[in-house]
Structure formats: C-alpha cells, structure tokens
Image (cartoon, grey):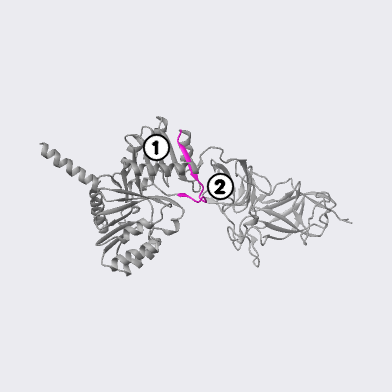
Amino acid sequence: MRFILLVIGCFLASKASAATYTLVTEPDQGLTPIYNLISSAKSTLDMTMYELTDTQAEQLLAQAAGAGVAVRVILDQNLEMRNNTPAYSYLSAHGVQVHWANPKYSATHQKTITVDGSVSAIMTLNLTSQYYSSDRDFAVIDNDPDDVAAIVATFDADFTNSTVTPGDGDALVWSPTNSQPVILDAINSAEDSLLVENEEMSDTNVTKALIGAAKRGVLVRVVMTNTTNEYAAEFTQLAAAGVEVSTYSPSAPLYIHAKVILADYGGDGAQVIIGSENFSSASLTRNRELGIVLSNPEILESIETTLSNDFNGGTLWGASGPAITNIVNTASSQPGFASGAWLTIFGTNLSPVTDDWTDSLAGTLATSLDGVTVTVGDQLAFPSYISPTQINAVAPNVTAGPLEVTVSAPNGTSARAPAIAETVQPAFFQWGDYAVATHLDYTAAVKNGTFSEPTVPAAPGEIIILWGTGFGLTIPPAPLGALVPPGTTYSTVGAVTVALGSVQAKVLSAVLAPGFAALYQVAIQIPESLADGDYAVLASIAGTQSPENVLLTVLSNRQ
C-alpha cells in the first residue's frame, strides 16, 4: 500500500512539475509571445479564431505550412465571415487547411492556438492587429497535458462539424457546456473580493450574481469600457447595490476587451477565470467559447496588479458624473428637438472643460469633443460646444418619437434622460427677443441698439434672410455628419410659410446654408404694406409653427 501511495505521489508530483502556465498581458507585452508560439510548431498547429486580420500571424501560419507543419484553422462565419474572408483566402492559397466554423453556434468566439499537441494559448484577444496597441487582453500559454488533450479533441470535432462534449481537462471552461455555471459559481462562492473585467454586461444571471455578492459584503469591482451607454442601466443597477463600477470612455487610450474574474485574491481559495466568454447569454449558452480557471500565485498577483490599476484609471460610475436636467431646441429653447437639427443639453458635470469644435472642424463633424459624446436614441450626435453646464450639438437623423439621451465624458456617463424627437420643429435663432436676420450682404437686419455697434432694420419690400433650425428633410437629402457642401441647393421638402404679425411674407427660398451644419436660410420679402414697428415672425412647415415670441423690426425711414 505504501508503495502504491508512493507511486501515485510521484506521478502527481511529476504531472504538477510538467504543467506550467504563462500569462501574457496586452497591450503591455505585445504579440511577440504569440508569434513565437506559432513559429515554434514542428508538426501540427491548430487555431480557432473568432476574427483574424493580422497579416503577420497569417504569414507565420503560411510559413509553418510551407515547412511541412500540418496547419488547421477554424474561422467564425456567422458574425465575422466578411472580416475573415481575406485571411481564409490567403491561408487556403498557402497550404493551410481552413474551415468555416460550425454554423450551429451563434458564433465561434473562441481564441485558441495549439502547437504540436503539447501546448495551447487560451486567449481573450482576437488576432486583429488594429487593436493591439489599445486593448486590454490576456492570454494563458498552457502545457497541462489534460487541458491540451481536451482542446485538441474538441478542435478535431469542430473542424469537421461533429457533435462533441468538450472535456474539462484540469481547468477548462467551455461554452456552450459549462461556462455559465462555472462563472456563476465563482461569483456566488466569493467570500472577500471580486475583481472583474469584461466587454459586455447583458446576462441578467451574472448581473444578479454580482449584486448578490456585493449585498453579502463582498468587495465587488467591475472595470469596463462604456461604449454608447449600452450597459448604463446595468451599471446603475450594480452601483446602487454597492458594486464599484469603473468605466473608460470609448475614446480613452485603453479599451477593456478582456474577460476576467479574479475571486478572493490573497485568500486560500483565490482563483481567476480567463477566457473568451463575455457576460452575455449568447456567449455563455450559444457560442463556442473557451476559458481556463487558475490558482497559480504568480498569475493571480499579475492579474490583480493589472486589474487594480485599470480600475483606478477609470471613472467611478455615479461619482460626480454628468447629469442632464433639460434637452431643448437650441434656437428656441422649446423642449425636445428635431431630427438632424440643433439641440442643447443643460445639466451639471457635463464636461470637465469648456471648448468648441473650431479647432477641429473640417468637412465632416466629429462625434466626440475632448472625450465628450452625446448619444441620442442609439446614435451619436455631433457636439459643437461643451461646458460643465451646457452642450450644443447637431442631432443625428432619428425617428420621431420618445427616446433617451445620454452624455458620456471622461468623468462618467449620465443617466438616460427622456426627450421627444420631432420630424420638424422650426425655430429661428435669436438676438435677445429678435430673430437672427440679415440683409443680403449678411449685415444684421435688427433694431438699432440691439448691439453696441449701429444696425439697420429690415425695410418694407426688402429681401432679408432669417436663420433657423429644425425645418426638416431636404431635396436632395443633406449629408449627415458633415458641413453642407457648396454648389448644391438643399431645399426643404415641405413648403415654408412666414407671417409677420397677421401679414404673410413672400418666401423666396428655404435652404440649408452652405458651409454650416443644420442651419437653414429662409429668404423672405418684407410686405410693402407693413408700417414701422416690431412684428412677431412666425414660420410654418408641415403643420408645425415656430414660437410666437420672436420679433422682427420693420422700419421704412432708416436714415
């Protein structure tokens, strides 16, 4: 009996000494460890990759095949066929056996490389070189024989679209078989701390588990990139339960793409889960995914250092972040706004700086100004002016009706604010109580005394230009997110009428102003019959009227 125990002990010791796990942290280390792994192949190389757009990796695979290595690659087709087709064609032409992934999975989101049946890289990153310099990602290079054997067996089946129940090896986590229960168990069994990074937060089971952990006293910290406020509701729900959520702006130098759960660091049961699994129902229950559970002290320490630094570098959700109090038409201050027109947001902490787009304005309009973005419905607006209390922006083209608006800034993201989008909401910009109006030479047509310098009002019979926003679609359609180009006349689809008091003025044109964005020029002829005085100027289009409190001065004797 003692002999048998001794043999078993020696076997386990030998196995433990043979298995090593090497952590690769991106973007810190670069892709050299992954390229070196590919180049080390002597007999076989198997790769499963959600997205492959790295020409250097493709060339290394082709070189391996040219040197006699049996190279097989599985590429996702359900979501990434378009992006993967150039790599598929190149590899196929260079002796690599390439297989489009089994379409029965919602996506083959796994990212794994296995060399010579003896070592595997289990990764959170795709081989997409355009993201290497910005994305937080990890890879674990694993030579545990049981893990590698299970990965190879699953690859063999997936390469022929055969049915397979992946083996767990010593520490593997697969979708769609066991990743959800393993992840939920790690969260539910945490006693002291959870430090989490992920790209998605839509799986309600995971969200509930994180909330439950925080409520039972576990220190829960979540680090994510906040992209277009997709998970703002989940972030708010988590924060309300005591979860500390640290977010990065989409324009930040670091993008959180990693999928990592570090549980009870520093305790006896400390463990980390690293893999391709996002916190979404598809990723956990319908995709092909692969992760690994580790308790290696060096890896735990490195992960904790990286994730803690990432947490500290982000903005704590709900802490002095933007808050929206009102959303109005920029010209008239009416509640709501028109699709594609100027809107103004009032609030607090909307931006840490005051700036406008003057220095960055070109032919196209940017969707971010100093890291501040405005999301209208599910589309980004084009901010022109930002300050702590006000943002002016050109709205995207959205469908009329109720929607939600959010502001994302380096200091956080606002809660979703309700607003009403209109097809048209005509309004003239104002100088105080008076409409912004110009003579044909573009000098101000406003009552003298409005400004410190002398001005000349409009005269009966004169043609003047009124300047406004919210007059709707044009013929031809105006370019979205760009200054109106010269050389083409963009006339309103609907006919515009303008009244001065009770008298209708002749409308000569209603067009977008060249060189500007969402700014309309409405040219009218002042009725000859008008006596001197101030008149309410009212525009109508498609049955919608501009506000009544806007004045225009008419003066016949302007000497």
Three-letter code, disc 2:
Gly
Of all residues, the one furthest to the top in this rendering is: 216
Badge 1: how crowded within 10 Å, few (<14), some, or many (20+)?
many
Q: Is residue 292 magenta?
A: no
The part of the image, by quadrant, that contains residue 518 is bottom right
- Image coordinates of residue 350 in percent, x first then y, are 60, 43
- Image coordinates of residue 71 in percent, x first then y, are 28, 63
Which residue is denoted by mark 1 in the rendering? 194
Three-letter code, disc 1:
Leu
User: Circle 1 sits in a helix, a strand or a loop, which is it?
Assistant: strand
Q: Is residue 247 magenta?
A: yes
Q: Mark number for residue 536? A: none
Residue 64, placed above or below residue 446: below
Residue 461, placed above or below residue 66: above
- 335 left or right of 302 in image: right
Question: Is residue 520 in sight in this rendering?
Answer: yes
Badge 2: how crowded within 10 Å, few (<14), some, or many (20+)?
few
- Image coordinates of residue 419 in percent, x first then y, are 58, 44
Which residue is denoted by mark 2 in the rendering? 401
The part of the image, by quadrant, that contains residue 262 is top left
Closest to the camera, between mark 1 and mark 2, is: 1
- Image coordinates of residue 8 in percent, x first then y, are 15, 41
Instruction: Tell me how far mark 1 sits from mark 2, CA to CA.
Output: 41 Å
Q: Which residues are magenta?
A: 242-255
Q: How many marks?
A: 2
User: Circle 2 sits in a helix, a strand or a loop, which is it?
Assistant: strand
